[in-house]
Amino acid sequence: LRASLEGSRRAGAAGYVHKKKEAAFERALADARARLAAAPHSSARDLLVRYAADIERLAARRFAFAPDEALGWLAAIETRLKAYATRMSAMVAAARSSGDMDEIAARLAEAGLSGIDIAAVSFRSDGPQGAWRLSATRA
């Protein structure tokens, strides 16, 4: 897609298609569709489904857009996805394991707290764990 848009810009004529890169794009898009269809429902999946559909529409009508505008839009999507991936990586890095929580409970007990209760929290009844609930009382 990018090769076609850049080629059109350089050639000054809409309609340029780099056949090998176009075939690679079509394979990547088909692979992305299949992976997204098989992925569990999540906000990340929904975001990627929306972007993939937008890119597919852009690809189908790429020569109806000014190449620089279409390339700018693709660059903006890439920037947003990189920022999203960075935020998700930071959240995973900050996440606590059950071992971490056991260690926290032990430290709270050493500090004199009692009735320490740790439980996994899911945001949907059938969803994966999304957080921990920790409660304790001071004597």
Image: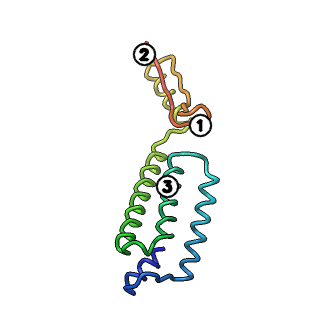
Q: Amino acid at mark 3?
A: Arg
Which residue is depicted at the point 50% across and 46% down? Answer: 43
The residue carrying pointer 2 sits among few (fewer than 14), some (14 to 19) or many (20 or more) residues within 10 Å by Cα, namely few
Which residue is depicted at the point 43% across and 53% down? Answer: 84
What residue would you read off at disc 1? Answer: 127
Of callouts 2 and 1, the N-terminal one:
1
The residue carrying pointer 3 sits among few (fewer than 14), some (14 to 19) or many (20 or more) residues within 10 Å by Cα, namely few
- Residue 50 in picture, x, y percent from top left: 49, 55
Q: Distance of mark 3 from mark 1, alpha carbons?
A: 22 Å
The image quarter containing residue 111 is: top left
Of callouts 3 and 2, the N-terminal one:
3
Q: Which mark is residue 50?
A: 3
The image quarter containing residue 14 is: bottom left
Question: Could you say whether the residue bearing mark 2 is in a helix, strand or loop?
Answer: strand
Q: Amino acid at mark 1?
A: Gly
Pick the quarter of the image with the C terminus: top left
Check the image and report above or below for 44 versus 138: below
Q: Distance of mark 3 from mark 2, alpha carbons?
A: 49 Å
Between 109 and 98, the one nearer to me in the picture: 98
Of discs 3 and 1, which sits in the foreground?
3
What residue would you read off at disc 2? Answer: 138
The image quarter containing residue 6 is: bottom left
Which residue is depicted at the point 58% across and 68% down? Answer: 28
Q: Count of labels shown?
A: 3
Which residue is depicted at the point 55% across and 27% down? Answer: 119
Marks 2 and 3: in contact by CB < 8 Å? no
Check the image and report above or below for 100 versus 108: below
Of callouts 3 and 1, the N-terminal one:
3
- Residue 79 in picture, x, y percent from top left: 39, 61
